[in-house]
Structures are given as structure tokens and as C-alpha cells.
């Protein structure tokens, strides 16, 4: 039950970030908001599995190198083959366009994502207590998802 509620929270974060990304448009696209929710809901288990390893390493031996390694592996390998393709196939109606856009954007998004999340993970493991791990990460996720929505919104259909 806790995983379901966390999936819902992540879905709400992604949909709220989509609303903010659409703020300057004349008409809010409710379908995009719903698709953002589905993306957030579907990708939470992937994030949970990956970052539970980060927390586990931190509990075993509080070295930031373990967290950085986990974050780097996630951003460079796991994210581009799991969460990112899901984003494109959920957000784009036409799957051929989704695949084409994914191939065009994958390198730049992986680079930007790595530049954001790897240093953030370093900061978080050094300066944020484990009790605050989730809320701090959710806040950063909200900011990152706004940036991702803005980056991809110009051609999302």
C-alpha cells in the first residue's frame, strides 16, 4: 500500500510540474497533465529500486562514493533505457514520433539529467540526513520534472 501511495505522490509531482510548464500557454492541456501523472506513477518503482540501493550503501558505509556510483549508473544506464523511453511513449500520442524524438533527445537529456542528479546526490548524501532523504529528493524531483517538461513541451503532442 505504501508503494501505491508513493506512486500516486510521484504522479502528482509530475502532473503538477506539467501544469507549471504549461503556465504561460493560453489553454491548459489536461491530457498532458494526465499523461504526466501516468509517467510519474509508472516510474516510481524504478526510482525506488535504484535509490533504495543508494540508501542501503549509505547505511552500510556512509561514503558518498557509493551514492555517486549508484546515481551515475542510474542516470547513464538505467534512466535512458527504462524511465526516459517510458516518458516519451506516454507523453507522445504517435509512437513513431515518440521513438524519433527519444532518439533525438536521449543524449542531451541524459547529459543534463546527469549534470543535475549526480551532484545533487553528492550534496544530499553529505549534508542531508537520512530522515530527510525522501522529502528533499521529492522537492528536487519536482524542480527537475518542470525542467524536463519545459524541454520537451515544444514538440509534445
Image: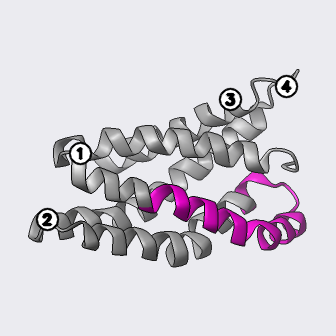
Looking at the image, is mark 2 or mark 3 nearer the viewer? 2
**First along the sequence among labels 3 and 4:** 3
Magenta stretch: give its range.
Answer: 89-118
- Residue linked to disc 2: 62
**First along the sequence among labels 4 and 1:** 4
Q: Are marks 3 and 4 in contact (CB under 8 Å)?
A: no
Picture layout, residue 48 above or below residue 102: above
Picture layout, residue 50 above or below residue 73: above
Inter-mark Cα distance, 1 to 3: 29 Å
State whether residue 1 appears in this view: no
Q: Residue furthest top?
A: 26
Q: Residue furthest left?
A: 60
| Secondary structure type for disc 1 | loop
- Residue linked to disc 1: 128
Inter-mark Cα distance, 4 to 1: 36 Å
- Residue pictured at 43% horizontal, 37% vertical: 139
- Residue linked to disc 3: 19
Q: Residues within 10 Å of mark 1 (few under 14, many from 20)?
A: few
**First along the sequence among labels 1 and 3:** 3
Inter-mark Cα distance, 1 to 2: 12 Å
| Secondary structure type for disc 4 | loop
Residue 114 % position (x, y): 53, 64
- Lateral position of residue 64 relative to residue 61, left or right: right
Q: Residues within 10 Å of mark 4 (few under 14, many from 20)?
A: few
- Residue linked to disc 4: 25
* Residue 114 highlighted magenta (yes or no): yes
Q: Are marks 4 and 2 in contact (CB under 8 Å)?
A: no
Amino acid at each position: 500500500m505504501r508503494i501505491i501511495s508513493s506512486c500516486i505522490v510521484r504522479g502528482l509531482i509530475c502532473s503538477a510540474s506539467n501544469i507549471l510548464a504549461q503556465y504561460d500557454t493560453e489553454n491548459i492541456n489536461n491530457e498532458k497533465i494526465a499523461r504526466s501523472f501516468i509517467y510519474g506513477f509508472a516510474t516510481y518503482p524504478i526510482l525506488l529500486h535504484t535509490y533504495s540501493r543508494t540508501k542501503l550503501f549509505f547505511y552500510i558505509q556512509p561514503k558518498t562514493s557509493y551514492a555517486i556510483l549508484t546515481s551515475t549508473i542510474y542516470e547513464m544506464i538505467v534512466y535512458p533505457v527504462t524511465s526516459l523511453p517510458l516518458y516519451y511513449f506516454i507523453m507522445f500520442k504517435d509512437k513513431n514520433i515518440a521513438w524519433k524524438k527519444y532518439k533525438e533527445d536521449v543524449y542531451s537529456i541524459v547529459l543534463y539529467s546527469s549534470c543535475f542528479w549526480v551532484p545533487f546526490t553528492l550534496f544530499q548524501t553529505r549534508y542531508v540526513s537520512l530522515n530527510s532523504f525522501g522529502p528533499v529528493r521529492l522537492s528536487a524531483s519536482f524542480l527537475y520534472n518542470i525542467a524536463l517538461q519545459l524541454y520537451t513541451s515544444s514538440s509534445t503532442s
